[in-house]
Amino acid sequence: MITIDETITVPRILEDAYWESYPLELTDEGVRRFKTQTQSDSRKPIVYVHVESRTGRVLRIGYSSEGIYYRWTKNTNGHIATFEWAMKLSQTYKGMAPRFPQYVLFFNRLVNMKTTVWTVECCDQSAKVVEKVLTDAFTPVWEQFNSRCRSASVRPGQIGSLTVNDRTYSAPGLPELRELKSGRIWPFECN
């Protein structure tokens, strides 16, 4: 576990910490497997790094005070709920979607992608620091994508000229992920 009283550097975070990985193929079946795999999570504070398995491209980095299962799977405004909404698999995220259309669009762009979610346990006070150090070092695709969303008229309730509730993501000018790169490639081999 990474604690705040230690020097928090990228090499220390990557080399000295214990990382767990969870494969996540962004398909209906892949999401079901991910939910099962993460159920036994400790619910302790973690920092997660979401990585495209094939390329090692860092997609997102974030923090959860209650572990990966709660943040990604159980929480009704978690990442899996966002993905399921974008794919028309669930209504769970319906109330949140208009407020966060950039997340819906981002997860829609990940459909069928094989990814891995890496987690490292942190004390609550160090997690935000670890998240920032990793985000600054790896420049996740999400950071660029979110910036492009603001430029492309992705606003609360709207994705381009369409409402979020239409769940249509092909309007011209909307950001794609293909051309975006992370600042660094994730150093661990993905499943």
Image: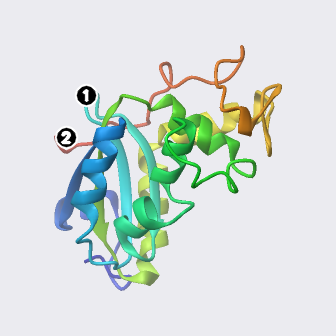
- Please tell me which residue is depicted at 27% across the width and 78% down the height of the picture: 42
Element class at badge 2: loop
Residue most extreme to the top: 172
Please state the horizontal and vertical placement of residue 162, each as a whole percent of the image.
79, 28
Question: Does residue 143 appear in this view?
Answer: yes
Please state the horizontal and vertical placement of residue 24, each as a whole percent of the image.
29, 44
Please state the horizontal and vertical placement of residue 150, each as a whole percent of the image.
76, 36
- Please tell me which residue is depicted at 26% across the width and 71% down the height of the picture: 41
Q: Residue 93 carries which label?
A: none
Query: In the rendered view of the protein, which quadrant contains the C terminus?
Result: top left
Element class at badge 1: loop
Mark with earlier residue (2, 1): 1
- Please tell me which residue is depicted at 21% across the width and 54% down the height of the picture: 21
| Residue situated in front as seen by the camera: 124 or 104 | 104
Question: Does residue 25 appear in this view?
Answer: no
| Residue situated in front as seen by the camera: 146 or 172 | 172
Q: Do the residues labelled 2 and 1 touch (CB within 8 Å)?
A: yes
| Residue situated in front as seen by the camera: 127 or 46 | 46
| Residue situated in front as seen by the camera: 136 or 31 | 31
Query: Measured along the vertical axis of the image, is residue 138 above or below residue 114?
Result: below
Q: Residue 54 carries which label?
A: 1
Left of 34 or right of it: where is 148? right
Residue named by callout 2: 190
How far apart are labels 2 and 1 at the CA level? 8 Å
Callout 2: 10 Å neighbours few (<14), some, many (20+)?
Answer: some
Left of 173 or right of it: where is 105? left
Amino acid residing under circle 1: Arg
Amino acid residing under circle 2: Cys
